[in-house]
Image (cartoon, rainbow, N blue to C red):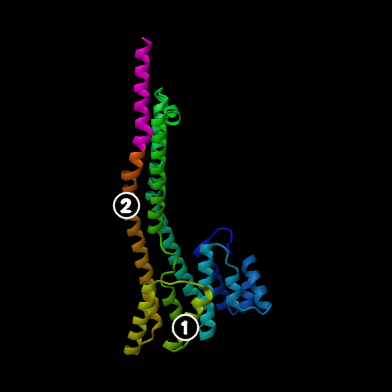
Amino acid sequence: MREKGGSGYGAVADVAQRLAVLLGAGVPPGAAWGYLGAVGARVAAAIEGGADVAGAIRAEATSASDRRAWAAIAAAWQIATDAGAPLAATLREFAAALRSLEQIERNVASALAAPRATARMVMVLPAVGILFGAVLGFNTVGVLVTTPAGLACLATGGALMLVARGWNRRLVAAAKPDGSIAGLRLDLTAIAVAGGSSLERASLAVDRALLSAELGTTADDAATVDSVLDLARRAGVPAAELLRSEADQSRRKVATQAERRASILAVRLMLPLGLCILPAFMILAVVPLLIAVVSSTIGSGLAQ
């Protein structure tokens, strides 16, 4: 469900913001969706056909990033409708949350860009070494593919490069966020309690919505929801604002952790570099070059 000019959380946040404005102006939900281009028209058609609104929204998700964002909107819509929370205000606040998530994704991508580029660059070192030997006039490629020693170097160096490649990929994958939406459970619970649901009913409604949307949330969010609801219950204060504040804090925490993992990644990538890539460089580039030099020297001496 991707509109031209945007993708992921940002595009969905734009649609949610427009919906909030239309609904706030008194436009009925079905008609409001119909004003939002091809995507909105399909949702509006599904609504007119008697489909559940949340289900129709979820059905429009396509890519992995869009799926999570639209599933989150569907969950928010479902909870707001069930709890009687105002849809316009709900969507406006949820759009702000999605933009925060979009900013986190951008920050993480920027933080990971340099380590990933470094990993790709060092992977070509052995090939550069082989070409350098050829430029100097030595038949390093011939040594690698035609001599027993060269074939042994090729097999050993190739194996080291494969290990380095897999190791780099695992390190980069471990540094990425796990895909769960930070603060989502807190935001959804805030919607439920803002609509007048009791704290217990709010928790149950959020669980049902998350299950329907097939969305995961962080373990910290679940613990934080229980803590905030307990605080609100003991203090006798509205829980919605507390929950939204904690949702923002949860997203800031996830962003900080992701940037820290990206910084650590730059250091950890030195392990495959030192243990695999540099030895592979020596085996694939330096050793064949030495063999070629020695062979050339011996051949020249015999010729004389």
Q: What element carries label 2?
A: helix
Please state the horizontal and vertical placement of residue 71, each as a whole percent of the image. 53, 71
Q: Which residue is drawn at 35% across and 78% down?
A: 223
* Mark 2 crowd level (few <14, some 14–19, many ≥20, 10 Å Cα): some
Asked whether 291 falls inside the magenta stretch, the response is yes
Q: Residue at x 62, y 73 (%)?
A: 33
Q: Do the residues labelled 2 and 1 touch (CB within 8 Å)?
A: no
Say whether residue 104 is visible: yes
Furthest toward the top, the residue is 304
The amino acid type found where label 1 is placed reads Ala
Q: Residue at x 43, y 58 (%)?
A: 106
Decide: is 79 above or below 153: below
Q: Give the range drawn in magenta.
A: 281-304
Please state the horizontal and vertical placement of residue 250, each as a whole percent of the image. 37, 71
Q: Looking at this view, is 220 or 134 the one in front?
A: 134
Q: Is residue 272 left or right of residue 72?
A: left
Residue 192: image tag? 1
Please state the horizontal and vertical placement of residue 19, each as a whole percent of the image. 56, 73
Q: Which residue is drawn at 51% across and 68% down?
A: 69
The amino acid type found where label 2 is placed reads Arg
Q: In this view, does 45 lie to the left or right of 200?
A: right
Decide: is 238 above or below 22: below
Q: Main secondary structure of the magenta part?
A: helix
- Which image quadrant: the N terminus? bottom right
Q: Earlier in the sequence, mark 2 or mark 1?
A: 1
The picture quadrant where one finds residue 46 is bottom right
Residue to which mark 2 is pinned = 268
Please state the horizontal and vertical placement of residue 25, each as a whole percent of the image. 57, 78
Residue 303: image tag? none
